[in-house]
Every structure is written in structure tokens, then in C-alpha cells.
Image (cartoon, rainbow, N blue to C red):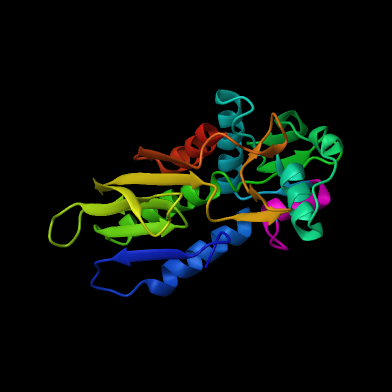
Amino acid sequence: AAFDTVCTVTTYSKSDNTLVYTDFLEALSSRLSAYDDGGEIYTLNKTGSAELSPDTTGLLCTAISYSGFFPELFDISVNPLCELWTEFKERGKVGDISQATQRVGCDGIYVDADKNFAEITKDGASVTLGAIAKGYASDALVDLMRKNGETSALINLGGSIYALGKKENKSDWRVGICDPDFTENSLLTLSISDTAVVTSGDYERYFEIDGKRYHHIIDRDTARPAAYFSSVTVITPDSGLADALSTALFV
């Protein structure tokens, strides 16, 4: 498990790189998590500043640029709202959200790409990469697998899927799109190769308060879980972009 979800990698390979890929995903998950003590994003949120690895710096810059492309639809600064809704879940009661909204905004996050340094510049602001981290990790794992000579694999990081090459029999990989109302069923099946299929949905990570369901994807406009779709799937060769787009479209 990594990125707070079950991760699977299916590969046709002459060598067993299971531990290599497992360790790689777990290290990425720790580095990018807002909740893993000692990770770079955790340190940034906890102390207000952090020295970053070049890869994390690049991901932060990309994520902030996506926030500019999709204003108010994709925003890594919604972490105060995410934390507040986690608190509501634990209390079993929805409370006031007005103060948390004042802490949201990418203008409260400063990144120095040359020095690999980030700083929180707004009181109470914090960062979450949950809307892009799995897609980024999928792309990074694909790069590693290609360097190791892998030509055929299917990666599934909790709904962020990437098909590397084709199956051993030269056929495309087949990926089902889940029916959000009947999750044991597929709405349709895709045949893909060297392509990402990333889904954002309200049917896996959710909780109920007074009989009402609340999921984990927050709409910055309302400061509440987005209430427009049950599931959005994006298909593109770039897993990180697909992850960000599926969240933006869902919102």
C-alpha cells in the first residue's frame, strides 16, 4: 500500500523487481504526503518551510501552474479544508467552514525552483498533493521501469492506471471503468497501450453524517465536497496531467 490506497503492478519480466518498485512507491508516498512525519510536504506544512528534492520542487511548480490553468478547480492549497472535513468526520458533525476558507490560495505558497526551497507565506496555509501525487508517481514508476528494460506492465495506483506497452501476447491491456452506483460492475472496458486512465470518484473514500454522504474531493468555491458528478475519467499519455484534470473536471 502507498498513497493511502492499494497499489498493484502487473508486469511481464525476466527478473523480479517487486521490492525495487515497492520501495520506490513507498518512498515517493512518504516524500509527498502531507501526513507522513518526516516527508518533504509534511515538513513544509509543519514548519512553514522546507528544503526539497529537485523532483518535489518540479512537482510543486507544475501543480501550482495547473492551479493557474484551472482556477478554483484544481488547487493544492485546499489542505486546510481537507483537514477540517477530516475533523468533521471524526466528530460526526459538520461545523463552521468560514475561517478555513481564508487560509486557502496558492498565493500563500512560495517556491524557489533554483534553490529547491518552499515556504508557506500565509498564516494557516498548507499544501496537499493528493490530487496529483498518484499520477506523478505512476509516471515516475514508468520511467524507472523503462530504464530497467521493462516493456510490458499495468500499473494501478488506486484508480490511477497506466498501461506500459502491450501484454506479452501483443494485445492491448483492457481496463474497466467502474460504475459508481454499482461498483462491482464496469460501465465500459477500454483497450489501451502506453496510455493513462485516471478516475476521480465519490464512491471509495467517503463518510456519512446524519445519513448524508461526504466524499474527499473538495470544491474550493463551496468549501464542501464537490456535488456535480459521481465519477470522472481522463484518458491521456500523461498520468500527472490526467490526475489533475480528473480532479478539476470533477469539481
Q: Residue at x 24, y 67 (%)?
A: 12
In the rendered image, residue 231 lying in the magenta stretch gets the answer no
In the foreground, 45 or 246: 246
Residue 91 location, x and y as percent?
81, 58
Residue 69 location, x and y as percent?
55, 24
Q: Is residue 2 visible?
A: yes
Q: Is residue 140 above or below residue 97?
A: below
In the rendered image, residue 41 lying in the magenta stretch gets the answer yes
| Chain part drawn in magenta | 35-48
Residue 125 location, x and y as percent?
79, 40
Q: Is residue 149 above or below residue 120?
A: below
Q: Is residue 33 visible?
A: no
Q: Is residue 16 left or right of residue 84?
A: left
In the foreground, 150 or 54: 150
Q: Residue at x 55, y 48 (%)?
A: 202
Q: Is residue 150 above or below residue 93?
A: below
Q: Residue furthest front?
A: 211
Q: Is residue 80 left or right of residue 14?
A: right
Q: Residue furthest left?
A: 169
Residue 224 location, x and y as percent?
70, 39
